Amino acid sequence: MSNTEQLTTFYVGDSLFGIDVMKVQEVTGKAHITLVPRAPQFISGLINLRGQIATAVNLSALFKDKTDIQENQMTVVCHFEGGLVSLIVDSIGDVVEVDKKQFEKTPEILPGNVRKYIKGIYKMNGSLMSVLDIEKIFEELSPEGKRE
């Protein structure tokens, strides 16, 4: 078993996040989003990716309860249980390899609306990278998903 993991990194505002590369299908530029009536604020709508439909989740709205639309937003398309979700992020970072021994639990000081979507953190060259718990976001999209 490897002592490292590879993460695709991205930014939401000034915050650095990472997600397991094996969960990422692709990274794309801003996509055309079809609005969904009465969807929660964090769901921007649906995206057609070459015939596959993905739910577009605005991470800024999910974490901060605001929906700032930036001109150069990107999407990180993730797969799960045969479905796709497109995470709308402010910018893309690098793919990084991290030592699992450096993984730390999520600090309690993070606001609950952010902390519940974070598996833990890595210290990266003087900054912190939060590891996104994509399964928790998928739970928000399911009919049984619970919102605080």
Image (cartoon, rainbow, N blue to C red):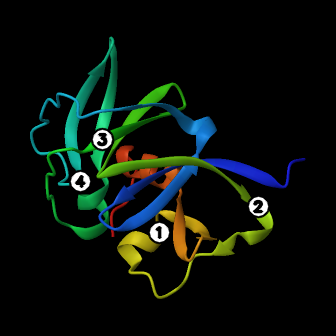
From the image, tell me which residue sits under label 1. 116
Q: Which mark is residue 7?
A: none
From the image, tell me which residue sits under label 4. 42
Q: Earlier in the sequence, mark 3 or mark 1?
A: 3
What is the C-alpha distance between the residues marked 3 and 2? Answer: 27 Å
What is the C-alpha distance between the residues marked 2 and 1? Answer: 23 Å
Q: Amino acid at mark 1?
A: Lys
Q: Measured along the vertical axis of the image, is residue 47 above or below residue 70?
A: above
Q: Amino acid at mark 3?
A: Met
Q: Earlier in the sequence, mark 3 or mark 2?
A: 3
Q: Is residue 14 left or right of residue 129?
A: left
What is the C-alpha distance between the residues marked 1 and 4? Answer: 15 Å
Q: Earlier in the sequence, mark 2 or mark 1?
A: 2
Q: Measured along the vertical axis of the image, is residue 32 above or below residue 91?
A: above
- Which marked residue is nearer to the observer: mark 3 or mark 1? 3
Q: Is residue 137 left or right of residue 3?
A: left
**Marks 1 and 4: CB-CB under 8 Å?**
no
Q: Is residue 8 left or right of residue 112?
A: right
Mark 4 burial class by Cα count in 10 Å: few <14, some 14-19, many 20+: many
Q: Amino acid at mark 4?
A: Phe
Instruction: Report the residue at 31% width, 55% height from top.
Output: 59
Q: Residue furthest bottom?
A: 109
Q: Earlier in the sequence, mark 3 or mark 4?
A: 4
From the image, tell me which residue sits under label 2. 99
What is the C-alpha distance between the residues marked 4 and 2? Answer: 32 Å
From the image, tell me which residue sits under label 3. 74
**Which quadrant of the rendered structure holds the C terminus?**
bottom left
**Element type where label 1 sits in the image:** loop
- Which marked residue is nearer to the observer: mark 2 or mark 1? 2
**Marks 3 and 4: CB-CB under 8 Å?**
no
